[in-house]
Image: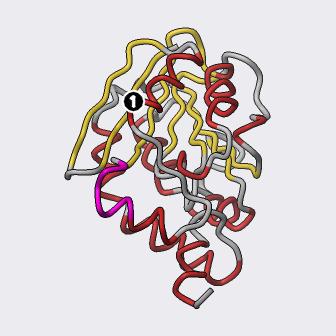
Amino acid sequence: MGTLSKFWNTNAHPEGWMGRLALRMMNLTHTPMALWNLSLIDFQPDWTILDAGCGGGKNIARMLKRCPEGKVYGIDYSEESVAYSIKNNRKHIGTRCFIQQGNVMELPYEDAKFDLVTAYETVYFWPDLKKAFAEVFRVLKPGGMFTFSYGDESSSTMCYWANEIEAMRILPVDEISQLLTNAGFTDLQIARKGGYTINFRIKK
């Protein structure tokens, strides 16, 4: 595997200097998509939120601003991501912001804890979506929302990244929708932007 391929593959699990560089690039290049996704949510000031696969922590910072009386938790499989997210949100760590290393397949939170769970540009790397969606459903409050960004599997952009990144898996939108329904989610809303970016919003 060449250097460029190694770098692209760090997006699945950022490690070392390549991982740190990838996290910085993600914070920058994902900003337009993230802002659009966040604009679709009617944030409440006192919400408790989980950002699953929090990456570089930029979206945690954005949600802390949108919920000035609330709390935002972050979890990521990558130790590098956790460290970088903590650094980017150090002002609120331990008071309104709580970030830890962990696995979305076994979320370390009690039932019905969160008003909102977000997952931006990370669902592609979850190895068992059935189990992951069930865990998200479990930690959401009744009436809580799960929202995440995804890419249209038919777009040339997403096909390119799926070929470059070994751990990346892109399922058809209909299949994702069915998995969410099977997990118990209702009121599925799908929005599209830019030809390939898709936003899923569903409620418990």
User: Residue visible at 63% across and 40% down?
Assistant: 73
The magenta stretch spans residue 156: yes
Closest to the observer: 71 or 203? Answer: 203
User: Residue visible at 60% across and 24% down?
Assistant: 114
Task: Look at mark 1 in the image and give the residue it sits on.
Answer: 174
Q: What range of the chain is rendered magenta? A: 153-159
In the rendered structure, the answer to whether residue 93 lies left or right of residue 171 reads right
Q: Position of residue 161 (x, y in %)?
A: 44, 66
Q: Position of residue 103 (x, y in %)?
A: 75, 45
Q: Position of residue 152 (x, y in %)?
A: 33, 47
* Position of 189 relative to 198 (above/below): above
Q: How is the image coloured?
A: secondary structure
SS for callout 1 = helix
Residue found at the very far top of the displayed protein: 142
The mark tally for this picture is: 1
Q: Position of residue 147 (x, y in %)?
A: 44, 32
Q: Quadrant of the N terminus?
A: bottom right
User: Residue visible at 67% across and 52% down?
Assistant: 76
Q: Quadrant of residue 105?
A: top right
The magenta stretch spans residue 108: no
Closest to the observer: 48 or 93? Answer: 48
Bin the neighbour count of mark 1 within 10 Å (Cα to Cα): few under 14, some 14-19, many 20 and up: few
* Position of 192 relative to 87 (above/below): above
Q: Quadrant of residue 142?
A: top right
Mark 1 residue type: Asp
